[in-house]
Image (cartoon, rainbow, N blue to C red):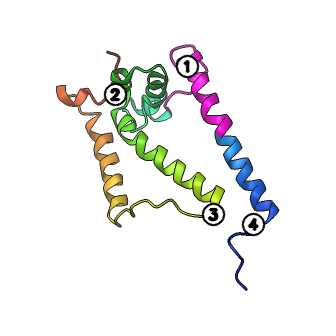
């Protein structure tokens, strides 16, 4: 027997409601927190364990400071903290909207399908970014988190 897509079990609706409600509370709450308490020394935000152990920047280093700069509307400073995050943020937002739309309606958004090689490309871009932001040569040092 196949289930009719128009009828959704009450437990599935509860899951959908919780998912959307959590996002509706978490995203503005996180943005308000980043706006009110910018990351820095003496704040409660966790530091990067990889950087603490190795002294090298991981692909996510500067991500919290980047998000804080974006919440404050300072795009140049956000790019200085983590340019890959700023570039990928629209794609991450589109993916989140797609997942929430699919969970809420049970249908997929009409988006173009990514080719099979896109996942490999994203992986290698992240690896290259990770390596290049740790090379101590002038133009590449701009990839490491820094203040303007």
- Indicate whether 67 appears above or below 99: above
Q: Nearer the viewer, mark 4 or mark 1?
A: 4
Q: Could you tell me which quadrant the N terminus lies in?
A: bottom right
Specify few, some or many for label 3: CA neighbours under 10 Å numbering under 14, 14-19, or 20 or more: some
Q: Which residues are magenta?
A: 24-48
Q: Are marks 3 and 4 in contact (CB under 8 Å)?
A: yes
Residue named by callout 2: 79
* Residue 26: percent from left, percent from top: 65, 35
Q: What distance separates the C-alpha of mark 1 from that of mark 2? A: 17 Å
Q: Is residue 148 left or right of residue 96?
A: left
Residue found 61% across the figure and 30% down from its top: 28
* Residue 130: percent from left, percent from top: 33, 40
Q: Is residue 115 left or right of residue 52?
A: left
Specify few, some or many for label 4: CA neighbours under 10 Å numbering under 14, 14-19, or 20 or more: few
Residue named by callout 4: 8
Q: What distance separates the C-alpha of mark 1 from that of mark 3? A: 34 Å
- Indicate the secondary structure of the residue bearing disc 3: loop
Q: In the rendered image, is residue 137 in sight?
A: no
Specify few, some or many for label 1: CA neighbours under 10 Å numbering under 14, 14-19, or 20 or more: some
Q: Are marks 2 and 4 in contact (CB under 8 Å)?
A: no
Q: Which mark is residue 35?
A: 1
Residue found 68% across the figure and 35% down from its top: 25
- Indicate whether 130 appears above or below 13: above
- Indicate the secondary structure of the residue bearing disc 4: loop
Q: Could you tell me which quadrant the C terminus lies in?
A: top left
| Foreground pick, 117 / 146 | 117
| Residue 36 highlighted magenta (yes or no) | yes
| Marks 4 and 1, the one that precedes in the sequence | 4
| Residue 82 highlighted magenta (yes or no) | no
- Indicate the secondary structure of the residue bearing disc 2: helix
């Amino acid at each position: 027997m196949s289930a009719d897509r128009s009828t959704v079990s009450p437990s599935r609706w509860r899951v959908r409601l919780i998912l959307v409600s959590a996002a509706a509370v978490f995203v503005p709450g996180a943005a308000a927190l980043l706006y009110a308490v910018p990351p820095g020394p003496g704040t409660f935000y966790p530091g990067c364990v990889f950087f603490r152990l190795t002294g090298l920047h991981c692909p996510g280093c500067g991500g919290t400071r980047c998000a804080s700069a974006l919440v404050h509307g300072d795009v140049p400073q956000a790019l200085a903290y983590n340019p890959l995050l700023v570039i990928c943020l629209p794609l991450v937002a589109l993916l989140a909207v797609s997942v929430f739309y699919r969970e809420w309606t049970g249908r997929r958004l009409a988006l173009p399908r990514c080719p099979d090689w896109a996942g490999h490309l994203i992986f290698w871009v992240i690896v290259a970014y990770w390596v290049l932001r740790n090379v101590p040569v002038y133009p590449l040092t701009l990839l490491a988190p820094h203040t303007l």
